Amino acid sequence: MSRFSFLGLAAMMASTALATPSLVTPSLAASGPWPTSEGSGACAVTKTSNVPAKMRDGTILRADVYTPATTGKVPVLLMRTQYGKEAAQVQPSRFQSPAWFASQCYIVVVQDIRGQGKSGGTFYEYRYDRDDGYDTVQWAAALPGADGQVAMYGSSYVGATQWLAATATPPALKAIIPSNTGDDYYDGWSYEDGAFRLAFITPWMMETIASSAAANRGDKDLSKALFADGKNPSTWLSFTPYGAFPPLHPEKPEVAPYFYDTVAHPTRDSFWEAFQIRTHYDRVKVPVLAFDGWYDSFLTGAINNFNGMRVSGGSAQARANQRLVLGPWEHIGWGRPDAVVSPMLKDIGPVANSPVNELTVRFLDHVLKGKDNGYTDGPRVDYFTMGENRWHTATSFPVAGTQYRTWYLGSEGRANSSMGDGSLTLDKPAGSPSDHFIYNPANPVPSLGGHSCCSWTSGPQGQFDQSAIEQRPDILVYTSAPLKEALDVTGPITVDLFAATDAKDTDFTAKLIDVLPDGRAINLNNGIIRAAYRDSLSHPTPIVPGKVYEYHIKVWPTSNLFKPGHRIRLEISSSDYPQFAPNPNTGEPLATARTAVIANQTIWHDATHRSSVILPVLPATVVGDGVDHPPQD
């Protein structure tokens, strides 16, 4: 060990009795086939545990610090996590170990955020991460051996801690590498176009953040109970009203106040604005390398961040150096043989593996150490096209040169189920009848895959054959004729739906499907709109029962090559459970609604009401050949 590294460790040890040094290897952090030492760097690494950092209000947060044996000062790579600094988001097959990153000759700091793990203070999601992030970045920049530059990395909420810190503009922050994270903790995180994201929010809060916060407070029995409820949430997901959700103990305000605040604020109001990223890009002055997946719960947020920073980033360097990698991934299913991935995505094979670790090092070496290593600056989007199973590159998203084609819904009035007569054509309807179905909140359409969080084994995400549920009469199915030529659909999809209901409020859902010649119906992505939120997420307005409204349903982006002989399909319904909380159709507030009524739904597709789906199509001249491996530079 160099004299420099020894003095640094000695100084940190002297600051706390809990800090203990130990030599580590790049693969020590976890057992099994992941992580490995493959690709590790040349620097030997020493770990010091529970290093304290004092926040501006006096709260002590603790981190594990991995120090490389070097003769010169090096940058810091920081992770701020609520999921345990010892875990460091290594499993399931996600990031390499902190020691692996440190072996690349970086000081790596993994910190428990406020009220979690070994850190002090009271946990409340999002609330403290802007100020604590700023303070931690500046503290990390002054660690022994640090050269004053800090980058941040991590996934999901750990991505949120990066963006929140970046919007505070700490001078030492020079780059962030957020994976699978959003731009808005209201829309696209807790809610989606007015619908509550039930299958994500409630299990996540029970199994992880509320459980670990209880352990931090010393309430071991409650922690175990919450973890158990979160591991098997099915018995609780149908409970209403959400404002009295028993597992999170509404009578104990210290358990999960953020959950009850979430359901008490079902609109985009000042509560949510306090945590925004999307309105503060001008404060973020650093390059960004971001990763996300077509079936992730925060896909649109990642795309919004990329586009928002390109236009409004706080420095010319930031605006010019945005990069986004979009793969065929779920929230934590990033590929590799031992990853937990829905079967159809897993079958794609190694071409779909995430390059997050290797590309992160190349990015850091380029941005922080000034190496001319072939890393490609932004603006750049690397995206994976399913069906073709190749990677492509663009400078924008949607991709420049995208052509938008409108496909119209039609039927003879019997589009119910895949056995019905629903059609999808490029011809405008002349006098096509309407379709009808009954939506019963007590018998909602089951979620089968889609974009959600956090694992397909515990919630609805990923790619699955939809054939089984398409036999339900409360799903309208509109299908094209077999395609004569390949069709590359890449980008966001919009459904313009003319619909009426006899209820005071309701939901409408849409799902884009690739129908294979053998009849399998593969979901690409989905969307939902709560009727009262049709014009505004901040100021919902009631609907008039029986009146026809035009709804714009945002089906989330995808990239898929529809091959010749395949058919395009659009599903329309009013529920997607448990991904979204069923609308009770009564217009009552989310937190207090106890009762539900059946709604009679009508979908119009005549010459006056041309219901349609608008697909983003890429001509072959725009797409190019692509490559058969993940991006490497």
Image (cartoon, rainbow, N blue to C red):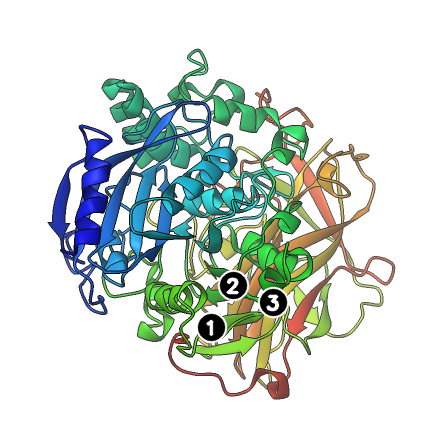
- The quadrant of the rendering that contains the C terminus is bottom left
Where 613 sits versus 24, above or below? below
Mark 2 surroundings: few (<14), some (14-19) or many (≥20) residues within 10 A = many
Residue hosting label 1: 386
- In the shown orientation, is residue 530 left or right of residue 78? right
Where 466 sits versus 219, above or below? below
Secondary structure of the residue carrying numbered label 2: strand
Comes first in the chain, label 3 or label 2: 3
Rounded to the nearest angstrom, the CA distance separating label 3 from label 1 is 28 Å
Where 465 sits versus 115, above or below? below
Q: Splitting the image into 4 quarters, where does residue 39 fall?
A: bottom left
Secondary structure of the residue carrying numbered label 3: helix
Name the spot of residue 588 as percent of width and height, x first.
Answer: 66, 24
Between 166 and 399, the one lying in front of the other is 166
Question: Visible in this render: residue 404?
Answer: yes
Mark nearer the viewer, 3 or 2: 3
Between 98 and 435, the one lying in front of the other is 98
Name the spot of residue 429 as percent of width and height, x first.
Answer: 80, 67
Mark 3 surroundings: few (<14), some (14-19) or many (≥20) residues within 10 A = some
Q: Residue at x 23, y 51 (%)?
A: 67
Q: Residue furthest top?
A: 251
Residue hosting label 3: 320
Comes first in the chain, label 3 or label 1: 3
Name the spot of residue 24 as percent of width and height, x first.
Answer: 14, 52
Residue hosting label 2: 524
Do callouts 3 and 2 mark residues in contact (Cβ within 8 Å)?
no
Q: Residue at x 70, y 43 (%)?
A: 601
User: In the rendered structure, which amino acid carries the disc numbered 2?
Assistant: Leu
User: In the rendered structure, which amino acid carries the disc numbered 1?
Assistant: Met
Do callouts 2 and 1 mark residues in contact (Cβ within 8 Å)?
yes
Q: Splitting the image into 4 quarters, where does residue 353 fall?
A: bottom left
